[in-house]
């Protein structure tokens, strides 16, 4: 993995209070976090029960009537 180039923002006591990264690095981090969140959501979905064909058809018929 590449080293993240960062700049620290300090308070008046020289305590690190924030980090600044370039936009390209931030977007990479953001994409990784979104992908991870999507992966976890998909995993959770796999633990639920699935509808059978007939039940799914009935469910979708109900959706059409609701609109």
Image (cartoon, grey):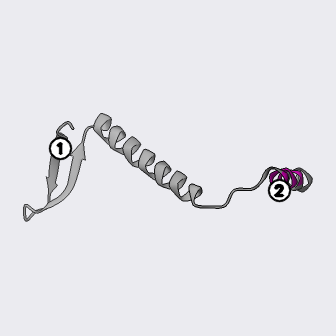
First-in-chain label (2 vs 1): 1
* Residue nearest the observer in this picture, 8 or 13: 8
Against 46, is 32 above or below?
A: above
* Residue nearest the observer in this picture, 46 or 39: 46
At x 44%, y 45%, the residue is 35
At x 37%, y 44%, the residue is 32
Percent across and percent down for residue 61 are: 89, 51
Percent across and percent down for residue 23 are: 31, 37
Mark 2 element type? helix
Mark 1 element type? strand
Mark 2 or mark 1: which is in front? Answer: 2
At x 49%, y 49%, the residue is 38
Against 51, is 35 above or below?
A: above
What's the CA distance linking mark 2 and mark 1? 53 Å
| Picture disc at residue 55 | 2
Q: Quadrant of residue 59?
A: bottom right
- Whether residue 23 appears in magenta in the rendering, the answer is no
SS majority, magenta: helix
Crowding at dot 1, Cα within 10 Å, few <14 / some 14-19 / many 20+, comes out as few
User: Which quadrant is the N terminus positioned in?
Assistant: top left
| Picture disc at residue 60 | none
Percent across and percent down for residue 54 are: 85, 52
Q: Name the residue under label 1.
A: 6
> Residue at the left extreme?
14
* Residue nearest the observer in this picture, 57 or 62: 57
Tag 2 near tag 1, CB within 8 Å:
no
Q: What stretch is highlighted in magenta?
A: 54-61
Residue 53 appears left or right of 23:
right
């Amino acid at each position: 993995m590449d080293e993240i180039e960062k700049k620290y923002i300090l308070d008046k006591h020289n305590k690190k209070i924030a980090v600044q990264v370039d936009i390209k690095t931030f977007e990479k981090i953001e994409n990784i976090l979104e992908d991870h969140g999507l992966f976890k959501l998909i995993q959770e979905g796999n633990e639920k029960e699935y509808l059978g064909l007939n039940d799914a058809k009935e469910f979708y018929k109900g959706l059409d009537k609701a609109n």
